[in-house]
Amino acid sequence: MDAKLRKSAIDVKDVEEVFELADSVKANKAIIVTNHGWTEPAQKKAEFIGMDLRILTIEDALELIVEDYWKLCPSCENDCIVMDSNSSFIIDGLVFWSIGGRCRTCKTAIAWCQECGQRELINLNFESA
């Protein structure tokens, strides 16, 4: 992961530099975190090479390096799942809170209940018959 604290949007050159670094160390995932966004060509380049672009505050970016926010997909083992979705609901007065994420490669999702610690794999790769 590369974080860019800047005064302007990142461009294609930034995306290519991070990708080359990730490729040289044989990383299986590259993400750029920035505070000022990116250009449309940078977004297209990132999508083409399978890189994520995110706008986060410094505090939010620091949370992403906390253990359990990044998971290698247990289904395909080809991509990382960023546990960046959260939800909560109440049933009979009990609050259930979970975080989750989805693999872009095989579409497997992980839902992780923060209260009890249970983790569920959900196959979201539905094929039409």
Image (cartoon, helix red, strand yellow):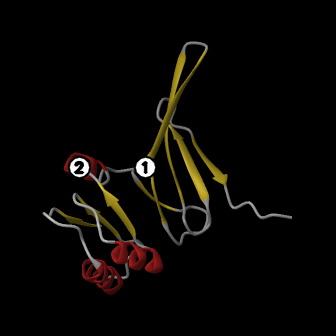
Q: Residue furthest front?
A: 40
55 is higher (above) or lower (below) than 20: above
Which quarter shows the C terminus?
bottom right
Residue drawn at point x = 54 percent, y = 65 percent: 104
Is 61 placed left or right of 53 in the picture? left
87 is higher (above) or lower (below) than 32: above
For mark 1, does the 10 Å Cα neighbourhood hold few (<14), some (14 to 19), or many (20 or more) residues? few
Closer to the camera in the image, 74 or 86: 86
User: Which residue is label 1 attached to?
Assistant: 84
User: Which residue is label 2 attached to?
Assistant: 57
Is 42 placed left or right of 8 in the picture? right
For mark 2, does the 10 Å Cα neighbourhood hold few (<14), some (14 to 19), or many (20 or more) residues? some
Closer to the camera in the image, 93 or 7: 7
Is 4 placed left or right of 126 in the picture? left
Secondary structure of the residue carrying numbered label 1? loop
Q: Residue flagged by tag 2: what amino acid is it?
A: Thr
Residue drawn at point x = 23 percent, y = 67 percent: 9
Q: Which mark, residue 48?
A: none
Residue 77 at x, y = what percent?
Answer: 54, 69
Residue 25 at x, y = what percent?
Answer: 31, 82
Q: Where, by quadrant of the figure, is residue 43 drawn?
A: bottom left
Secondary structure of the residue carrying numbered label 2? loop
Q: Residue furthest left?
A: 7
Q: Residue furthest right?
A: 129
Q: Residue flagged by tag 1: what amino acid is it?
A: Asp
Residue 87 at x, y = what percent?
Answer: 50, 35
Q: Where, by quadrant of the figure, is residue 111 drawn?
A: top right
Tell whether label 2 touches label 1 (CB within 8 Å): no
Which quarter shows the N terminus?
bottom left
